[in-house]
Amino acid sequence: MTVALVAFLIALAVTGNPVDSDRNVLIIFDAVLIAVAAIALFTVSARSPERPGGALDWMQLVLIVVALVVDLVMLWAMAGRLAQWGPSANKIAGLGANVLLLGHLAGSAWWYLRICLARRASPVATTTRLVRWQCAALPVFGGWALVVALVFPPLFGWS
């Protein structure tokens, strides 16, 4: 997944402005960012809290940091598309999801970094905080999904 995200960043750097990217490419990479968040959640749930940071934790941290860079590029592209073509329900829903992903991934990166750097100290407390961070994110994403499902239809005049 990390290699795919780096390849995406290289492709964007070669092709130019991400605002001009195809809408479907942006949607696909939103799905990839959601997959990264899911991978982080799964990895945390499978991690033994007593185990000090190791190679898997560093790999996870690198994946999350690269995903953060991709998310920032996606936010830039979305903001540019909003400025260029105006708001729509899909653009605002995607923008909101990407902002939530940015916060979630940033927090995950912070806690993974703390786990990776705390080799001698017991990582139980830090792992517990990472687990709490991951669990706290789920209702936030669910809340955004409810806003999109319940508030957007009347807001945008859908019947």
Image (spheres, rainbow, N blue to C red):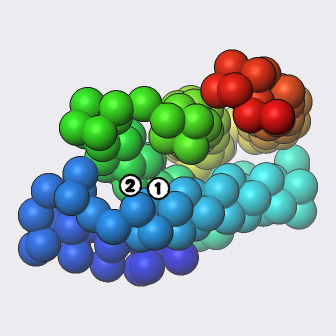
Residue 59: image x %, image y %? 54, 67
Where's the C terminus, which quadrant? top right
The quarter holding residue 57 reads: bottom right
Q: Is residue 131 above or below residue 47?
A: above
Q: Is residue 79 above or below residue 38?
A: above
Residue 31: image x %, image y %? 61, 63
- Secondary structure type for disc 1: helix
The one nearer the camera, 136 or 93, is: 93
The one nearer the camera, 41 or 18, is: 18
Q: Is 115 left or right of 88, judged from the image as shown?
A: right
Q: Is residue 47 visible?
A: no
Residue assigned mark 1: 67
Residue assigned mark 2: 70
Residue 139: image x %, image y %? 87, 30
Residue shown at the point (50%, 35%) measured from the top left = 88
Residue shown at the point (10%, 64%) measured from the top left = 16
The quarter holding residue 4 reads: bottom left
Mark 2 vs 1: CB contact within 8 A: yes
Question: How many numbered markers are drawn?
Answer: 2
Mark 1: few/some/many CA within 10 Å (<14, 14-19, 20+): many
Disc sitting over residue 149 in the figure: none
Q: Can residue 112 be seen in this view?
A: yes
Q: Is residue 63 above or below residue 111?
A: below
Amino acid under disc 1: Ala
- Secondary structure type for disc 2: helix
Residue shown at the point (40%, 62%) measured from the top left = 23
Amino acid under disc 2: Val
Q: Distance between the residues labelled 2 and 1?
A: 5 Å
